[in-house]
Image (cartoon, helix red, strand yellow):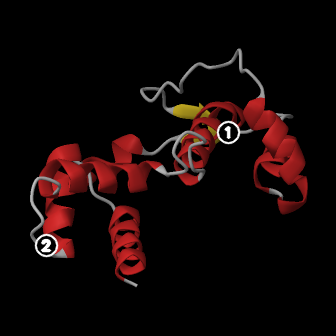
Amino acid sequence: MFSDLGSHLKRCVLDEETAPMLSKVFDPKKADHRKKWLLEADDEADRMDYEADTMNLTQFLKTEVKTYSLDSVSRAIPSMCDFLKESQRKIIWASMAYFGKTNNEFKASELTEQIVGMFGSFTLVLLASINNRLHNWLL
């Protein structure tokens, strides 16, 4: 993939909406506007054309950055049903599925290995969450 990096580079195209959109997305003073923007239903839910040589920066902000922001928020805010974040729910599910049948002690590395095996993904955030949960449970 990295051997052909040049084929993945895109030329950014700016238009009259780019500067206001950049301000809306990244300016710390416009957090309230950003919240409203994220809650709005978007008719322009089109995805970027990754095969094109050029990329409209305004369209990128409206689609890809908005999607990324919504996904980040959904992972960061606990659910109203069980007050758990997605990563915490994965930890508990894996703990119950694998270690809940016995009362044997286990190491954090065993739990991490089990979660990776069950969910097929692993991030540093998940590792930090495991360590925080175990630390809180042991205190």
Query: Mark 2 highlights which residue?
Result: 106
Q: Is residue 91 left or right of residue 94?
A: right
Q: Is residue 32 left or right of residue 130?
A: right
Q: Is residue 90 above or below residue 46?
A: below
Q: Is residue 82 above or below residue 76?
A: above
- Quick one: 97 or 9, which is closer to the camera? 97
**SS for tag 1?**
helix
Point out which mark residue 61 bears. 1
Q: Quote the CA–CA distance across marks 2 and 1.
A: 45 Å
Residue 101 x %, y %: 11, 53
**In the rendered image, which quarter is residue 36 located in?**
top right
Residue 17 x %, y %: 84, 34
Which residue is found at the position 88% from the left and 43% from the top?
33
- Quick one: 31 or 24, which is closer to the camera? 31
Which residue is found at the position 28% from the left and 48% from the top?
93
Count residues near mark 2 (Cα–Cα under 10 Å), then give few for <14, some for 14-19, many for 20+.
few
Residue 3 x %, y %: 22, 53
